[in-house]
Image (tube, helix red, strand yellow):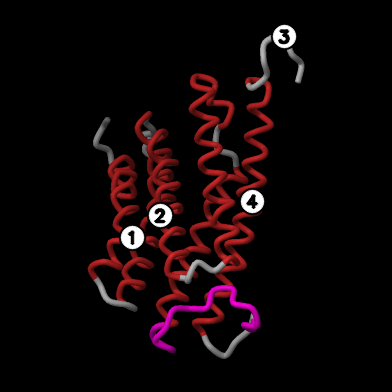
């Protein structure tokens, strides 16, 4: 590994991923929510910066190529688990969260199975949009959890039946917008997962069989 700026930023994102739940261990709410939001947003911004610098400065490396998607997945997966737990395990959030987690495990398994052929599952533009949508959705949901404690002194009612989509409460509005974005991200996640599966299917067939 070369200690270039892009690689250092990628490494910092890997460290930041498990630090998100630690915010709720060391800080009281809503300060924990604000700290998690700030940490997650900084990590999301560095995801774009390290890729841009690596290309601009011609510092692309095998370490960056391997660790960058891992850092992205770690940030998203850990943050979704934290938000789902603090939302009261509401099914309106659990369903898209489960789909996102399943896809990440599924595609990682495909890449591991394909080995040297894993290059067939290179990141697509749609997959990049998927990751962007996930990060924006998670940021908005963290905003909603923090605002809920400021406005109501309670956790947000994520996706609770009867809760209006447009509310006078900024916390409820942020939570509902974040929930909508999570569902959009889940749809993009499933779409890209199916695309990767279709590309890997020829290598999943038994020798001598056409299907």
In this figure, which residue is indicated by the disc labeled 4?
A: 188
Residue closest to the eye, 9 or 156: 156
Quarter of image, res 150: bottom left
Q: CA distance from mark 3 to mark 4?
A: 34 Å
Q: Is residue 152 magenta?
A: yes
In this figure, which residue is indicated by the disc labeled 1?
A: 20
Mark closer to the observer (3, 4):
3
Residue 78, label in figure = 2
Give residue 167's position: percent from left, percent from top. Answer: 60, 87
Please report contact status of discs 3 and 2: CB closer than 8 Å, yes or no.
no
Helix, strand or loop at label 4? It is helix
Residue closest to the eye, 177 or 152: 152
Quadrant containing the C terminus in the rendered view: top right
- 147 to 89, vertically: above or below: below
Residue 208, label in figure = 3
**Mark earlier in primary sequence (1, 2):** 1
Mark closer to the observer (4, 2):
2
Please report contact status of discs 4 and 2: CB closer than 8 Å, yes or no.
no
Q: Is residue 199 left or right of residue 57?
A: right
Q: Residues within 10 Å of mark 4 (few under 14, many from 20)?
A: many
Q: Is residue 154 magenta?
A: yes
- 91 to 2, vertically: above or below: below
Residue closest to the eye, 66 or 47: 66
Q: CA distance from mark 3 to mark 2?
A: 42 Å
Q: Main secondary structure of the magenta part?
A: loop
Please report contact status of discs 1 and 2: CB closer than 8 Å, yes or no.
yes
Give residue 6's position: percent from left, percent from top. Answer: 33, 42
**Mark earlier in primary sequence (1, 4):** 1
Give residue 164's position: percent from left, percent from top. Answer: 64, 83
**Mark earlier in primary sequence (4, 2):** 2
Which contiguous range is marked in magenta?
149-164
């Amino acid at each position: 590994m070369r200690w270039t700026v892009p690689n250092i930023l990628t490494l910092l994102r890997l460290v930041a991923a498990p630090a998100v739940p630690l915010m709720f261990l060391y800080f009281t709410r809503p300060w924990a929510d604000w700290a998690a939001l700030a940490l997650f947003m900084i990590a999301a911004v560095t995801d774009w910066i390290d890729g841009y610098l690596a290309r601009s400065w011609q510092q692309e490396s095998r370490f960056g190529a391997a660790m960058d998607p891992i850092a992205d997945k770690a940030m998203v997966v850990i943050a979704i688990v934290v938000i789902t737990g603090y939302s009261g395990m509401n099914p309106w959030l659990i369903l898209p969260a489960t789909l996102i987690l399943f896809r990440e495990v599924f595609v990682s398994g495909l890449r591991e199975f394909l080995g040297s052929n894993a290059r067939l599952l290179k990141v697509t533009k749609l997959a990049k949009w998927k990751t962007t949508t996930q990060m924006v959705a998670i940021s908005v949901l963290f905003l909603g959890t923090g605002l809920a404690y400021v406005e109501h002194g309670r956790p947000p009612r994520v996706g609770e039946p009867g809760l209006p989509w447009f509310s006078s409460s900024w916390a409820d509005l942020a939570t509902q917008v974040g929930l909508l974005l999570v569902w959009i991200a889940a749809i993009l996640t499933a779409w890209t997962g199916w695309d990767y599966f279709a590309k890997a299917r020829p290598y999943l067939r038994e020798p001598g069989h056409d299907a």
